[in-house]
């Protein structure tokens, strides 16, 4: 009499295991579609209120990257290279650029491969190549590393920390940084062995000690995507000189208000 219930239980357990394995296989092959969102369109409708030059930056693997370049004075002011996050286009950052232009700084923002009409598909290795290509492009104007500031936004912090290692950049700005992509993904997939499946790891916490440049870490306490504790951890592990801008009411995309701009301005002045 007990054999049939036992068989049903075994069939149920087998079905659960098969479904779980299917989910693992799906996530392994589909993970980059879950990580990179080039077609997401947040913060649309803003208009640039200053002049930018649209530029094309060629990578070593022959991909043309769209960039927006705002040049005040390359000799007098530092130059920010802005690495955006995992979603949206350059237009989605206009609200930030409209505030950055008021600072005494030049800046270049690039779109990743697969974003903003660029060819190619985003990967960790590919985005490192894109970021390095942007640095070399700026240097072709005669700008030295010690006058370049790397600015990473969310996913872009992974590229900024990778490139900044053991270099003499003027500074590094990390907005809503994560410790590693595995740590961040674990929040959304707690029952999945994400660190075993993950292709693009972006292990910021392992690299932060290799950065010798001054660092500014910015993060909001109510961040619903990257836990605030990760930004704190990055700050704690960073070398001096280091600065923080931690707020109580900011979510993942921080409010580009006057308080944040003042902090950026103070950081810039500390580099002169």
Image (cartoon, rainbow, N blue to C red):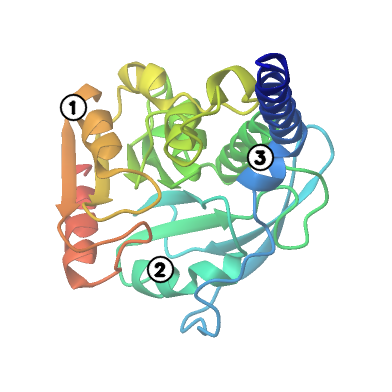
Q: Residue at x 36, y 66 (%)?
A: 100
Decide: few, some or many residues near mark 3? Use Cα within 10 Å; few <14, some 14-19, many ≥20: many
Q: Nearer the viewer, residue 139 or 221?
A: 221
Location of residue 126 in the rendering, given as x and y in whole percent from the top left corner: 70, 34
Q: Which residue is mark 1?
A: 236
Location of residue 160 in the rendering, given as x and y in whole percent from the top left corner: 46, 36
- The answer to which of marks 2 and 1 sits earlier in the sequence is 2
Task: State whether residue 251 is above or below residue 34.
Answer: below
Q: Which residue is mark 2?
A: 96
Q: In the image, which is nearer the foreground, mark 1 or mark 3? A: 1
Q: Secondary structure at mark 1?
A: helix
Q: Residue furthest front?
A: 1
Q: Secondary structure at mark 3?
A: helix
Is residue 191 visible from the viewing direction of this image?
yes
Task: State whether residue 139 is above or below residue 167.
Answer: below
Q: Nearer the viewer, residue 229 or 202?
A: 229
- The answer to which of marks 2 and 3 sits earlier in the sequence is 2
Location of residue 252 in the rendering, given as x and y in whole percent from the top left corner: 36, 56
Which quadrant of the structure image shows residue 177? top left
**What's the CA distance linking mark 2 and mark 3?**
21 Å
Q: Are marks 2 and 1 in contact (CB under 8 Å)?
A: no
Q: Residue at x 62, y 25 (%)?
A: 198
Considering the image in quadrants, where does the N terminus appear?
Answer: top right
Q: Are marks 1 and 3 in contact (CB under 8 Å)?
A: no
Is residue 75 visible from the viewing direction of this image?
no
Q: In the image, which is nearer the foreground, mark 2 or mark 1? A: 1
Q: Which residue is mark 3?
A: 130
Q: Residue at x 32, y 72 (%)?
A: 102
What is the total number of numbered labels drawn onto the structure image? 3
Q: Is residue 114 left or right of residue 223?
A: right
Q: Is residue 77 left or right of residue 119?
A: left
């Amino acid at each position: 009499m007990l054999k049939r219930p036992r068989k049903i239980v075994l069939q149920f357990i087998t079905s659960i295991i098969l479904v779980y394995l299917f989910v693992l296989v799906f996530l392994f092959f589909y993970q980059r579609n879950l990580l990179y969102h080039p077609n997401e369109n947040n913060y649309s409708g803003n208009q640039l209120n200053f002049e930018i030059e649209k530029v094309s930056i060629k990578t070593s693997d022959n991909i043309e990257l769209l960039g927006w370049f705002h040049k005040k004075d390359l000799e007098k002011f530092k130059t920010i290279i802005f690495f955006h996050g995992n979603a949206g286009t350059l237009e989605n950052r206009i609200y930030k650029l409209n505030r950055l232009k008021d600072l005494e700084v030049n800046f270049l923002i690039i779109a990743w491969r697969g974003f903003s009409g660029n060819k190619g598909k985003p990967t960790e290795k590919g985005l490192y190549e894109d970021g390095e290509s942007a640095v070399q492009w700026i240097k072709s104007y005669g700008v030295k590393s010690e006058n370049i500031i790397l600015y990473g936004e969310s996913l872009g912090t992974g590229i900024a920390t990778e490139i900044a290692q053991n270099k003499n950049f003027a500074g590094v700005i990390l907005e809503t940084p994560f410790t590693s992509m595995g740590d961040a993904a674990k929040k959304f997939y707690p029952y999945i062995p994400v660190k075993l499946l993950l292709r693009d790891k972006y292990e910021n916490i392992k690299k932060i000690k290799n950065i010798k440049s001054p660092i500014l870490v910015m993060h909001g306490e109510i961040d619903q995507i990257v836990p605030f504790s990760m930004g704190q951890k990055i700050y704690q592990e960073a070398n001096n000189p280091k600065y923080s801008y931690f707020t109580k009411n900011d979510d993942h995309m921080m409010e580009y208000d006057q308080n944040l701009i003042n902090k950026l301005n103070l950081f810039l002045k500390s580099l002169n």
